[in-house]
Amino acid sequence: MAGWMRGFIGLIVALLAAACAPAAPAPTAEPATPAPTNTPFVRPTLPPTFTPAVTPTEAALDLPPTPTPVLVQPLTGVRIEPPFSITLPEGWGRASDTFLYEELGDVVTVPFTLYQGPVSGGRGTILVLWNFRSVAAANPLGTPTTERSNWSDGLRLLRYPVFEPTCNIGTEPERAFTVGGRPATGTNFAAVDCPELPNTRGWFAGLTVNEIPFVFYVYTDPLEAMLGRAPQELQAILDSIVFQ
């Protein structure tokens, strides 16, 4: 399965390419549902256009126009809106879907929403995964526990499948963050030397709300943008979140 775990930049390409593709003729017979397979995509030479929405927060993603071949993990096409509201700056856009990946011998589905737009010094990305399988926190007494470990979940998903398995990923010790005014746990990270993705730097913050686990991955490219005002601008977006 590692061959199609190429990171979430591939997910963006698949979503936007599908939105811009012309409608196919109606089939004469109902085909059988194919099993998910590796699918090559080429980033379009022109930024695709999203359907206009009622608010500026639904603006089109301004993706780089340079064609880049990538492999995309299978998408289900099921777009589930995250259970929170968010206020995005002008020029930001969003895309949602549900993806499949293999974990501990099982094929699991995880919904995600990606927000992307300009920040000081570059482009910012906020990627949120939720309602995923959680890793239980270790119990020092050796007895079973169902307590979620937002820290462990964030690290696990960061390395597989948020970024490519062959990326050089560095993390700092666990620290506290906030999302929507709620306490969260996570760490700063950097991902470099990825085969398909640009070098980036950022942080993740995980929390559980109404028994639903969330992890927010916040980063910029180029990574140098994190040395300026971008972190404050991205945190302001996280502060605007209101969970349902």
Image (tube, rainbow, N blue to C red):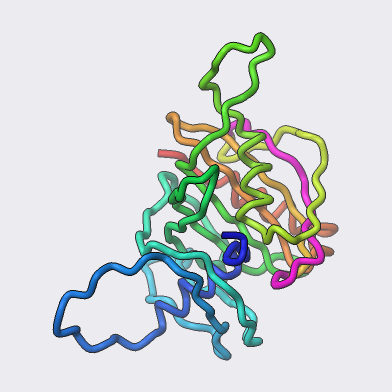
What percent of the width, then of the height, locates residue 50? 43, 76
Q: Residue furthest top?
A: 141
Q: Quadrant of residue 196?
A: bottom right
| Quarter of the figure with the C terminus | top left
Residue 163 at x, y percent in the picture: 67, 58
Examine the residues drawn in magenta and state their main secondary structure.
strand
For the residue pair 65 and 135, the one nearer the viewer reads as: 135
- The residue located at (15%, 80%) in the rendering is 29
Indicate whether 147 appears above or below 119: above
Side of 122 where 136 appears, left or right: left
Asked whether, in this view, residue 130 is left or right of residue 206, the answer is left
x, y percent for residue 9: 60, 68
Q: Nearer the viewer, residue 38 or 94?
A: 38
Residue at figure coordinates x 61%, y 38% from the top left: 153
Name the residue located 56 percent from the left edge and 59 percent from the top edge: 1
Span of residues in magenta: 182-197
Residue 112: say if magenta.
no
Q: Quadrant of residue 142?
A: top right
Task: Note whether 149 is above or below 83 in the view shown.
Answer: above
Q: Nearer the viewer, residue 131 or 232?
A: 131
Residue lying furthest left in this view?
Answer: 28
Q: Residue at x 53, y 35 (%)?
A: 134
141 and 193: which is toward the camera = 141
Instruction: Examine the rendered structure and indicate whether residue 92 appears above or below residue 179.
Output: below
| Residue 187 covered by magenta stretch | yes
